[in-house]
Image (cartoon, rainbow, N blue to C red):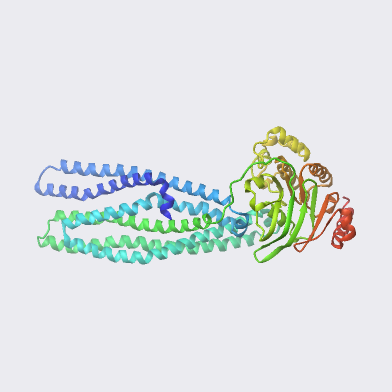
Amino acid sequence: MLFGVVRPHRRAVVGGGLLALVGGLAGLLEPLAAKAVVDALGRGGSLWGPIGVLTLVVLGGAVIATTGAYLLERTAESVVRAARERLIGRLLRLRVGEVDRLKPGDLMSRVTSDTTLLRAVAGQGLVDGVNGAVVLLGAIVLMGFMDPVLLGATVAVLVVVAASMALVLPRLARANERAQAAVGDMGSVLERALGAFRTVKASGAEARETAAAGEAAGRAWKHGVERARWEAVSGMSAWLSVQIAFLVVLGVGGARVAAGDMPVSSLIAFLLYLFYLTFPIAQVAEAATAWQAGLAAVRRMREVEVLPLESPEGGVVAGAAASVSLRDVRFGYGDAPVLRGVSLEVPSGGMTAFVGPSGAGKSTVFGLLERFYEAEDGVVAVDGVDVRRWPLAELRGAIGYVEQDAPILAGSLRDNLRYAAPEADDEEIMAVLARTRLDGLVEALPDGLDTRVGHRGTTLSGGQRQRVAIARALLRRPRLLLLDEATSQLDAANEAALKEVVDDLARTTTVLVIAHRLSTVTGADRIVVLEAGEVRAVGSHEELLEVDELYRDLAAVQFAADRNAGV
């Protein structure tokens, strides 16, 4: 899996790796050059030649290794960037149902902290593991030429260390995965609180949310400490192996020098090689540690990459008003059924209103039309064609949708208005703003259309946000307009004005409206009464008052409330 992430950058990795390898192999010459210096001292000869060679080897190796390290780190940043771009692209194309099931904070953690772990693997980690092993093998071969007996003592120590590493690495891998998952959980808890920040403040829930985030941070700390413990054991094993080998070689080598079986210069060179082993052994150990972290990160990224995606988005699709039909549609969220065999015919043009108690399935009908979800049974059709047979981009390009929450994105007012119709010019924008009574707002804003509206539109009132969302949908010139309680935050005057806009639009566009305030839809061409996921009745306002008891009760309660409120 990790090779798949690095493969597009393999040339840069190989180039940087070769430079790093040459730099490492140059280091193998240093003990030999030092031996030459000691031998020259013993003979009373000139030191300029051996010292010059030693200096050249040290400086040349350092320059080459530094160049390779820079190239590898640059490549590692490119790997992280590519992984993030790919993961973000997939996240934004996930099906709505998948995002509903997952935690946004955890998804963000996979894009941020998990991808960061790839840097260590794609940079020094992958190459250092190979180079460290090559240099380690080269040093062992040279040490064998110098003294096979001392080499045997050294290898015996290294084998013990390798066995201990084999026991540590699986535990390190599990600790890495748990630690990264815990960070994702912490992000989810924080995202929940920040997503409802004003509610948290108004409810005096700061302490409770802090405690919840603290618990998540505590779990992340616990697993992070576990990871640190195994990393420390791994690093200590590598360091301890060299120290033990040094003591063994010093004892055995000293005895061999005293017995005249080897010159002192060879013992010095052997000890230098032994100290030099510290670096490649540490490289291999660190590479193994980074590899485990990278594998855990790739596994978490892979969990997102295997989720089903939607096709790329499209643009505005012009055309005549669309017809809508539902035939015995059944759908539920998990084990909870929402629609229980809904059948309905909506001809092209005109306004159709959906009313009924909360949880009746009104918003779910809109979600099925947009193919945010797919019916478990039955057919949802637009223009007589099952929405599952429509190209998704073309289907959504023909629909204007105003959510119940009327979300506004951070950025300028112009950006928000053109979000669904990026090719719209200022003349079209101003015409739509006039229809939704937002032209006065634009004139009052300091930078007009270029005024920043803040995170989630915090600089706008609830009614203004709702009208911006409606204007955004109208700018798309939809064939089918879905309004989910689109006037819930408007005052009476703006509601009446917008009602006129929608009535006018219904002459050329099919408009479906979900309304809790019946006063806004009494003039609809047809009103669909939903209850418990079933169509209870369909008719005009006057017809339903006569034939449907639930509608009469809803009308009586709401009209009485409107009179009391002076609406």
380 displayed left or right of 550: left
Image coordinates of residue 115 in percent, x first then y, are 48, 52
Q: Position of residue 519 (x, y in %)?
A: 85, 51
Q: Position of residue 235 (x, y in %)?
A: 35, 60
Specify the farthest residue to the front: 384
Picture coordinates of residue 404, whole percent (x, y):
73, 52
* Image height of 353 relative to 240, above or below: above
Residue under the image location 14 percent in, 63 percent down: 255
Nearest to the observer: residue 47 or residue 511: 511
Q: Who's the residue at 76% across and 64% down the image?
A: 532
Position of residue 122 in the picture relative to residue 196 (left or right):
left
Give the quadrant of residue 208: bottom right
Residue 564 visible at all = no
Which residue in the rendered view is the most extreme toward the top?
427
Q: Give the quadrant of residue 270.
A: bottom left
As drawn, is 106 to the left or to the right of 247?
A: right
Please state, as top left, top right, bottom left or bottom right, where the N terminus lies in the image: bottom left
Of residue 417 and residue 308, the one placed in the foreground of this image is: 308
Q: Is residue 4 left or right of residue 204?
A: left
Q: Disc count in the image?
A: 0
Question: In this orientation, does residue 392 appear?
Answer: yes
Residue at image coords 21%, 50%: 31
